Image (cartoon, rainbow, N blue to C red):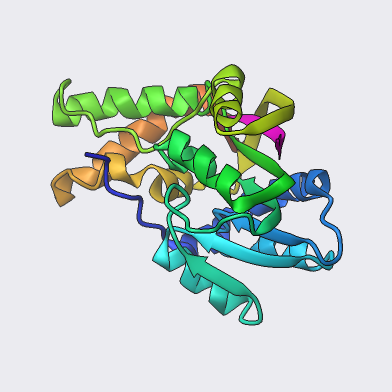
C-alpha cells in the first residue's frame, strides 16, 4: 500500500519556496516551447512555470495531483487550464507535442506507470523535458530526519519515504522501456540557498513534515528542532541555510 500523499501548505510554498519555479526557468529554456505547440506541465504546482510556457505562445495544460496546488494555480492564473489528476494514471493519449516537468516526478513513487503515461500522452516524435531529484538528493537532510525519527518512533517505525530519487541509468531505463528515446541526461549537485534563519525550518515544514505529523503534538516541534540542529553543522554556512539538492535533468523523444 503506497504512503499517503503529502499535503501542501500553499501559503508557505508561495511565500518561501519560489526557488522551485525560479530554478525551473532554465528547464523552460531547455524545452524551448514554440507558438501553437500543445504542452502538458506535469506536476504544475501553483502554475508559475505553466504561465511562463504559455507566454511563449504554446497551448498549455497544467496537471497536478494536489487539490491545494491546483486551487492555488487557478487562483494565480484564472485564464489558464489546470486539471487535477495523478501523473501515473492520467488519461491523455497522443495529445501533446511536449511534456514538461520540474521538481515533481520524484514525488510519484510508481515511476514506471508515470513513464508509460508520459509515452501514451505524447504524439509521435513528441518530447519530454524534465528535471527531478536524482540519486543522492538531500542525503544530509534525510540522514538527519532518519536519526531523529528513530529516536522518537523507534528504529523500526521510521515513516516511509514519499519520494523516489533515481540514478541517471535507472530513470533512462524506465523511459526507454516505455517507448521513449533518451537524447540527453545529466545528474548534478545544486546546493540551493533557503530564505532566512528559518530557511531549513520552513523547508522541513513544507517538504518533509510527514516525518513528524504522526508524533503526539507535544513532540512534533521538539523533533523538528532536533533535526534542524543536526543539520546546522553541515548545511548552515555564511549565515545561510542550504538544501543539498542533486538534480537529474533529462530529455527524451517518443520513438
Q: Is 249 within the magenta?
A: yes
Residue in the picture at 64% in, 59% down: 95
Q: Residue furthest bottom?
A: 79
226 or 82: nearer the eye? 82
Q: Is residue 133 above or below residue 213?
A: above
Residue in the picture at 47% in, 23% down: 140
The boundaries of the magenta stretch are 244-255
Residue in the picture at 42% in, 36% down: 163
109 or 127: nearer the eye? 127
Q: x%, y% of residue 138?
A: 50, 28
Q: x%, y% of residue 76?
A: 60, 75
Disc tally is 0
Q: x%, y% of residue 234?
A: 52, 22
Q: Residue furthest top?
A: 169
Figure quadrant of the N terminus: top left
Q: x%, y% of residue 244?
A: 57, 28
Asked whether, in this view, residue 193 is left or right of residue 2, the answer is right
Q: Name the magenta segment's main secondary structure.
A: strand
Question: Can I make out residue 4 in this image?
Answer: yes
Figure quadrant of the C terminus: top right
Asked whether, in this view, residue 183 is left or right of residue 171, the answer is right
| Residue 145 quadrant | top left
Q: Is residue 196 above or below residue 235?
A: below
Amino acid at each position: 500500500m503506497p504512503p499517503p500523499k503529502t499535503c501542501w501548505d500553499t501559503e508557505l510554498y508561495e511565500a518561501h519556496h519560489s526557488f522551485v519555479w525560479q530554478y525551473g526557468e532554465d528547464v523552460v529554456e531547455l524545452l524551448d516551447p514554440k507558438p501553437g505547440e500543445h504542452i502538458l506541465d506535469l506536476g504544475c504546482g501553483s502554475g508559475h512555470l505553466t504561465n511562463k510556457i504559455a507566454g511563449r505562445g504554446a497551448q498549455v495544460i497544467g496537471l497536478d495531483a494536489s487539490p491545494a496546488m491546483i486551487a492555488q494555480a487557478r487562483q494565480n492564473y484564472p485564464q489558464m487550464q489546470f486539471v487535477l489528476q495523478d501523473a501515473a494514471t492520467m488519461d491523455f493519449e497522443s495529445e501533446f507535442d511536449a511534456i514538461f516537468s520540474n521538481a515533481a516526478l520524484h514525488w510519484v513513487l510508481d515511476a514506471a506507470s508515470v513513464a508509460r503515461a508520459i509515452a501514451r500522452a505524447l504524439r509521435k516524435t513528441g518530447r519530454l523535458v524534465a528535471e527531478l531529484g536524482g540519486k543522492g538528493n538531500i542525503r544530509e537532510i534525510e540522514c538527519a530526519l532518519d536519526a531523529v525519527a528513530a529516536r522518537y518512533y523507534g528504529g523500526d517505525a521510521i515513516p516511509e519515504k514519499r519520494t523516489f530519487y533515481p540514478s541517471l541509468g535507472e530513470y533512462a531505463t524506465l523511459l526507454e522501456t516505455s517507448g521513449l528515446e533518451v537524447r540527453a541526461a545529466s545528474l548534478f549537485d545544486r546546493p540551493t540557498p533557503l530564505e532566512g534563519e528559518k530557511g531549513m525550518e520552513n523547508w522541513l515544514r513544507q517538504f518533509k513534515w510527514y516525518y513528524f505529523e504522526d508524533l503526539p503534538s507535544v513532540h512534533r516541534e521538539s523533533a523538528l528542532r532536533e533535526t534542524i540542529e543536526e543539520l546546522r553543522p553541515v548545511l548552515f554556512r555564511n549565515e545561510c541555510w542550504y538544501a543539498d539538492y542533486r538534480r537529474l535533468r533529462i530529455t527524451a523523444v517518443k520513438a
